[in-house]
Amino acid sequence: MGKIWMSGGGGGADLDVITAGAEDVLASKVIVDKDGEPLVGTMKNQGDWGFQELTAGSAVAIPEGKHGGGGKVTAKSLASQTPGDSAAGHILAGRTAWVNGSKITGTIPSQAGGTLTPSTSAVTANCSGKYMTSNYTIPAFALPPANALRKGYSYTLYGKTVTGAMQIFVNTPTNVTGNETGVTILSGSDTGSVLFTSDKKINFNSYSNQTVVLRLNTAVNLTDYKYLKFTIASAFTTSAGSSAKAKIGVATNSNGTGITYSNEVEVAPSSKDVVVVLDVTGLSGMYFVYISSYATKPGYSQGGRNCVFALSNS
């Protein structure tokens, strides 16, 4: 047990009550320990230590030692730590966010998707300004098959097109010559003659082995027909021993090129109602109609009289 004897009497101080160590005493300050020996303090004097701009979620270690009581740990402002440009209309309803130091509650409504059924008028999905929680589905559409649409007709739906392939044939034959305005000779002898009569019938001659090619002036639509028929009511000849050979054809050109011809038939002097047939089943659209003929005996004219064209399906 240590004691310090005080001058003037009265006994000494009991040192056993001393519990402070060097770390409990400011640096450079001296006390006595339990044994009465001098003890120099080691505690740092931090004074008014402080820390500026502490950010949210971070920490700062406070140094050990004596603090004067005037120090502060200062956090950055909430506004500086929550910068942004969002408003309530940018945030889902019921959700919150801190923006520039203020707490904002969102106002964007949520909406589930659904099915939009196409119609003959515009259909609008009312989703402007809303948050979609699922997809909108537009049912697939089906185009009609090509064989359900008339040949040459195109049907377009939502940018998809199908072109018809169904051939519709009419039941009633059409008199092509009845709608004609005239004929044009494209080649042949000047002696050969072509006459378009007032009752819309054709008389044609060819002379002395020379081929005459003539064309109806008006194109015809072959789309709905299978056959083009040319009926020669009677023959014309200047010699009993001669005959004419004739065939018919069609082409999209009016200049006599690219012609598709029928088989050739003979028109003998005694011939009546000779029919020349051209199969036009695979053709559609507008075509010019041609006649080609020549005489089989030199020096004579042969041909046909009161001839007519017709379109038919039988």
Image (cartoon, grey):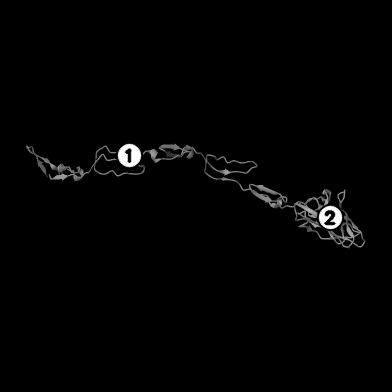
Horizontal side of residue 141 vs 98, given as left or right:
right
Look at the numbered disc 1 and give the secondary structure of its residue: strand
Horizontal side of residue 254 vs 53, given as left or right:
right
Residue drawn 39% across and 39% down?
80
Percent of width and height locating residue 294: 85, 60
Horizontal side of residue 129 vs 84, given as left or right:
right
Q: In which quadrant is the N terminus drawn? A: top left
Along the viewing direction, whichever of 58 and 280 lies nearer the viewer: 280
Q: Amino acid at mark 2?
A: Phe
Rounded to the nearest whole Å, what is the CA distance between mark 1 and mark 2?
110 Å
Residue beneath label 1, please? Answer: 74
Q: Amino acid at mark 1?
A: Thr
In the current view of this chain or complex, which residue is farthest to the right? Answer: 240
- The answer to whether residue 222 of the structure is visible from this angle is no
Look at the numbered disc 2 and give the secondary structure of its residue: strand
Classed neighbour count for the residue bearing mark 2: other residues with Cα under 10 Å, few (<14), some (14–19), many (≥20)? many
**Mark closer to the observer (1, 2):** 2
Q: Earlier in the sequence, mark 1 or mark 2?
A: 1
Percent of width and height locating residue 75: 34, 40
Q: Which mark is residue 230?
A: 2
Q: Quadrant of residue 113?
A: top right
Relative to 294, say whether 120 is above or below: above
Along the viewing direction, whichever of 186 and 142 lies nearer the viewer: 186
Horizontal side of residue 242 vs 74, given as left or right:
right
